[in-house]
Amino acid sequence: MIASLETSSELQRRRAKARWFRRLCQVLTWLCLVLLALLLVHATREGLPWLNVGFLTEFPSRFPERAGIKSALVGTLWLISLTALVSIPFGVAAAVYLEEYAGKNRLNSLIEVSIANLAGVPSIVYGILGLTVFVRWLALGRSVLAGALTMSLLILPVIIIASREALRAVPGSIRHAAFALGATRWQTTRHHVLPAALPGILTGTILALSRAIGETAPLIMIGALTYVAFVPEGPMDAFTALPIQIFNWVSRPQPEFHELAAAGIVVLLTVLLMMNAVAVLIRHRSSRDLQ
Amino acid sequence: MSSTILESPRAMEGGTAAPDLRRKRMRSWREESIKAVLFLCALLSVAVTIAIIVVLVKEALTFLQSVNVWGFLFGTRWTPLLEPRSFGVLPLLGGTFLIVLGSALIGIPIGLASAVYLSEYATNRVRGIVKPILEILAGIPTVVYGYFALTFITPLIRIVLPGTNIFNAASASIVVGIMVLPMVASLCDDALRAVPDSLRQGAYAVGATHLAVSTRVVVPAALSGVMASFVLALSRAVGETMAVTIAAGATPKLTLNPLESIQTMTAYIVQVSLGDTPVGTVEYQTIFAVGMLLFVVTLIANIGAHRILRRFREVYE
């Protein structure tokens, strides 16, 4: 009798502990949401008064009330377009090779190991690479092109990994059917596997590009300018980009510039959110199609 | 209709054998060249890896000709831009260590707790809300986190501890912790969900509480994945640049006090490249030496994470 009383109180104690643990995990999980909300609300509250048409159409200025992000916005557009042009063909081609062609041999596993390692290399190291190879050895100078090439190398592993996943998700029966009709490997890939994997590849690519939009450190390394009062007109022009402009404003001591930085952040996050929404939309539609 | 389809290949075979053979040869030539092009694209990754190593090693070696290796690795004064110059990298390593430690204290417990909650407790609806939130947190640019640290977290710390420097390691560590949190959470969540349900059912059957099942069965069973995610998070914190540049300051200092201004390896590289340092000078070469150190540290961490995954993986089924 006494023993069972003891066990029941022990049981209650254990159950109470379990309840507390559950609550703790729950609170910590929702803390993520709180943090995200805090960050967004803080930036929006600080930046909103500065957000107007002039902010988007003016060049940067020493006077906060006249400063805008036109050159940064156009620079980011240039940078991302060129980065997409370079990184998508190379990334998708590499993924196709590794998924559809590569057999098991030393060289191919070396490629796999390189990609896995490159995905973990800090972005600033890519900046050092870009500074040496593109800016100095290839003498591209501190141009949009040098920035875009550096960014392309940075997001290449991301695109390859995402594209490989998309290709792997294409059922083998599609390949077998094409081979059975006498199609070559390339014909099979080009006309059947790639179209089926396209939504997945697109989603991964958009997410990779949105990472490139927010990257700051490599651009500082290759010497994107912090004060640019013109719009780049070709790939060899000097440029600035949104995150660089934000960094420039954040590193000034005056609070007005911090608020300008917040306004820039609101623009940057809006662009990123739109890209993410497109990616989610594509993923959603394609998952419906497959069903 | 069907007979023409059946006959057509035979007709080609009989009538025009030579062009058909040529076409076949053309076709296989095309196939091979496409394969070669694709292979070269894949090889680009190896080329990039080699290029990174060559670039870093080349300039770092030139640097080490003017500075002694031991003096660089174990010197405790880092003043390459000021006279008298001194090239001991320990203050930068110490700064990085402080940030990594602080961010691990924030990111790892919260990340793991979220993963346990998501995989062991949460309903599908809650997962559907929390997962995208984590993805958004992971996708926010680091410069934004830097802004958040400087204009939101630092003032908060200074309300509680008024003696705190405007630039301090604590506020940078907190945002870097928030930054690595989604990574820990989603990698741990994957690892925990890979544990077969039979283990949980077995534990419940002998009367274990939900707490005991989570902490004594599921987490230990997924330990390799969980540990690997911790190591990857640390590696990410080592390489993190913008938040620490903005919020942690530019004072290379060997200290364990998180309320002081410090400098990390990454922030130092940014500082040098923001200035006008002429190519070929020792100051310029320092960024390659520090970059090399950074590369080696993150490489070891990443290889370590993969090793942990491979060696300690419990294989179910």
Image (cartoon, rainbow, N blue to C red):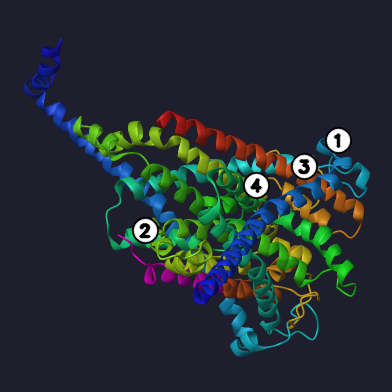
Q: Magenta stretch containing residue A82, yes or no?
A: no
The Cα atoms of the two marked residues, 3 and 4, are separated by: 15 Å
Residue at the disc numbered 1:
A52
Residue B300 visible in rendering = yes
What amino acid type should be assigned to the residue bearing mark 1? Asn
Task: State the extent of the magenta-drawn residues as a range.
Answer: B296-317
* Residue A162, position as x, y percentages in the image: 47, 47
* Vertical side of B161 occupied by B241: above or below: above
Residue A228 visible in rendering = no
Can marks 1 and 2 be said to lie on one chain?
A: no
What amino acid type should be assigned to the residue bearing mark 3? Ser
**Chain designation of label 4:** A
- Image quadrant containing the C terminus of chain A: top left
What amino acid type should be assigned to the residue bearing mark 2? Ser
Residue at the disc numbered 2:
B198
The Cα atoms of the two marked residues, 4 and 2, are separated by: 44 Å
Element on which disc 4 rests: helix
Element on which disc 1 rests: loop
Element on which disc 2 rests: helix
**Chain designation of label 1:** A
Please state which of residues B107 and A241 is positioned toward the viewer in this rendering. Answer: B107
Can marks 3 and 1 be said to lie on one chain?
A: yes
Q: Which mark is residue A213?
A: 4
Label 2 environment density (alpha carbons within 10 Å; few <14, some 14–19, many ≥20): few
Q: Is residue B52 found left or right of B72 in the rendered image?
A: left
**Chain designation of label 3:** A
Furthest residue in direction left, as rendered: B14
Closer to the chain start, of discs 3 and 4, is 3
Image depth: mark 4 or mark 2 in front? 2
Q: What residue sits 41% from the left and 44% below the top? A: A93
